[in-house]
Amino acid sequence: MKIYFAGSIRAGRDDAELYRRIIEHLRKYGQVLTEHVGDPNLSAEGQDGPSDKYIHDRDVAWLLSADAVVAEVTVPSLGVGYELATAVREGIPAAALFRTDGGKRLSAMIAGCGGVKVIEYSGAPESAFPALDTFLKEIEPR
């Protein structure tokens, strides 16, 4: 299975360690196409390619090849929203992980989207893994 993981880069890297732990868990199910999102050395500048167009085109190609999209959406990010919308439009199963103990509310555009499985959790991301496992086990590779 190919999994596209989405998390905030330019909107803030405070959750990079959390992303790394989620990505590590996702590897149990297959190839994570976007492991760099969990790299603590990737800065908020997000310069992991020669240009913004290169990054966009590469990431969209990865996303379109994925069997599933998993996003951590607690830190609001325009890019992550774009990636989830693309997955929904393309019929790619998508899950959004959201920490409820951060004092924030999830965007209605994600919470109200029938094409996105919202998985709420509090504390460590590992508390979301049972629901995430259920989501991933139901996916048939494309």
Image (cartoon, helix red, strand yellow):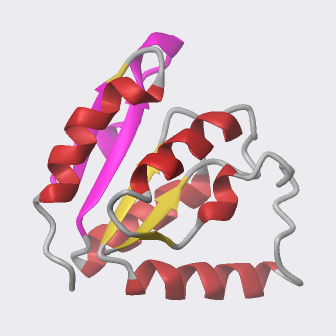
Answer left or right for 116 relative to 20. Answer: left
Quadrant for residue 132, please give it. Answer: top left
Residue 14: image x %, image y %?
Answer: 73, 32
User: Which of the two residues, 35 or 6, is positioned nearer the viewer here?
Assistant: 35
Residue 110, how many percent across, how many down? 33, 45
Q: Quadrant of the N terminus?
A: bottom left
Position of residue 104 measured from the top left corner of the image (x, y, whole percent): 49, 19
**Magenta highlight range:** 93-120
> Is residue 106 visible to the viewer in this orientation of the structure?
no
Q: Residue visible at 21% across and 86% down? A: 142
Nearer to us in this view, 138 or 55? 138
Nearest the viewer among 31 and 123 is 31
Res 91 visible: yes
**Residue pushed farthest front?**
28
Q: Is residue 110 magenta?
A: yes
Q: Residue 92 colored magenta?
A: no
Q: Residue at x 87, y 67 (%)?
A: 47
Q: How many marks?
A: 0
The residue drawn where x is 29% and y is 59% is 94
Considering only vertical position in the picture, is 5 above or below 53?
above
* Along the line of sight, the residue nearer the viewer: 130 or 15: 130
| As drawn, 100 above or below 53 | above
Q: Is residue 98 left or right of residue 142?
A: right
Q: Which residue is rendered at x = 64% and y = 48% of the image?
A: 8
| Image coordinates for residue 85, horizontal then vertical, percent | 38, 65
